[in-house]
Amino acid sequence: MGKKILVVEDDDTVRLSISVALRLKGGFEILEAEDGLRGLELAKQHNPDLIISDVVMNNLNGFVMLETLKEYPETADIPVIIMTNRAQSDKEWKTGAAVEYLAKGFTLEALLSKVNSILKIKPA
């Protein structure tokens, strides 16, 4: 079975596009959450190998979700890719975690490359 990735994104179209691309092109098992609260639940239940999350979402934003995940030993070390329109300024956020940033407008190839790099998967 492939690596498990949790995609947390409130825009259904974006979430579906990312999920389908990672599933078909990367062979990953994908979990989907429409907001940070659901993302927290799924991360605790399934302990994914990687989390890809938007920042601005209803119920719980991506940074608060990340801070909360760091409070639990079982989810504290999960690497995270934060998708944002403000990738440069958001690097100032002190997460103390393995966090990568990806500016929205990225290509699916760029995303897959970053995912493979984080998960140490060599391209085919």
Image (cartoon, rainbow, N blue to C red):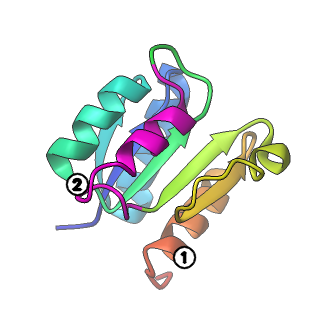
Question: Which of the labelled discs sits on residue 117, or is there none?
Answer: 1
Range of residues picked out in magenta = 60-78
> In the rendered view, would you say 32 is above or below 12?
below
Of helix, strand and loop, which one carries label 2? Answer: loop
Work out whether residue 118 or residue 28 is closer to the camera in this orientation and state it: 118
What distance separates the C-alpha of mark 1 from that of mark 2?
A: 19 Å
For the point 43% across and 74% down, the residue is 119
Question: In the image shown, does 9 or 76 lie closer to the viewer?
Answer: 76
Amino acid type, residue under disc 1 in the picture: Ser
SS type, badge 1:
helix
Locate residue 28: give its quadrant.
bottom left
Q: Is residue 25 above or below residue 92?
A: below
Kindly identify the amino acid type of the residue bearing the numbered disc 2. Asn
Residue 73 forms part of the magenta stretch: yes
Which residue is located at x 84 percent, y 45 percent?
89
Question: Which disc, if any, is residue 47?
Answer: 2
Relative to 93, 20 lies left or right? left
Q: Is residue 24 above or below residue 67?
A: below
**Residue 99 magenta:** no
Q: Residue at x 30, y 55 (%)?
A: 75
